[in-house]
Amino acid sequence: MKPALMRTMVLLLLLASCLLLPACDSFERNAYRTLKVTKVEYELLQEHAARAYLAGRLTQEQWDRFAIAGNRFIAAHTLAADLMKTYQEVRRAPGTPLAPPELRQDPRALEARITAALAALPPLVADLSALLQSFEPASAGRQPAPPRPQK
């Protein structure tokens, strides 16, 4: 998929998420936006890889490498999403004495864990993209970019 089309789709999803999350505070909005955007980016890369594999442009070994890297993203994304769910529950019932231990946490401490988990997602997507690009053969007929005019 072309990078310009991918960026357009991501921007549209960002806009939609801004409109759908007006009741959330900025931390939650940013967290959900990061979760949604990185998930969409991953799904686009996964679709591109699957099409390349089915078209014979990726070997089984390359597909397996992509799948393993994709599993790392999925695990990190799931962790961040689970932390967000816990964060929402903690905010709804802070300090409830009979709640399970994870719900008796300070929301600010959870925010730090969530921020760290979310920060891991974009580099994982970038790694997947770079891995996928490394599998694609350079086009023999590709013209080099014209030199930039100097100022």
Image (cartoon, rainbow, N blue to C red):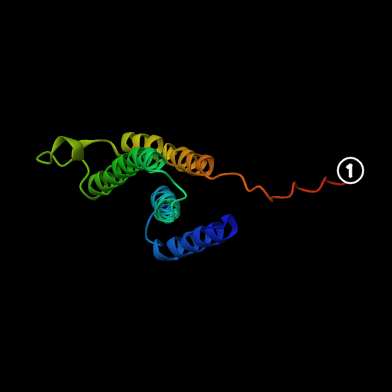
Residue 17 to residue 106: above or below: below
Q: Quadrant of the C terminus?
A: top right
Side (left or right) of 44 relative to 3: left
Image spot of residue 137 (x, y percent)? 56, 44
Image spot of residue 128 (x, y percent)? 45, 42
Image spot of residue 41 (x, y percent)? 45, 52
Mark 1 lies on a secondary structure that is: loop
Choose between 70 and 41: the one closer to the eye: 70
For the point 45% across and 43% down, which residue is it?
125
Choose between 24 and 128: the one closer to the eye: 128
Which image quarter: residue 87? top left
- Count of numbered tags: 1
Which image quarter: residue 102? top left
Q: Which residue type carries mark 1?
A: Gln
Which image quarter: residue 47? bottom left
Give the crowd class for mark 1: few <14, some 14-19, many >=20 residues within 10 Å.
few
Side (left or right) of 19 relative to 93: right
For the point 41% across and 51% down, which residue is it?
53
Choose between 1 and 83: the one closer to the eye: 1
Label 1 sits on residue: 150
Q: Residue furthest left?
A: 98
Image spot of residue 121 (x, y percent)? 42, 41
Side (left or right) of 149 relative to 39: right
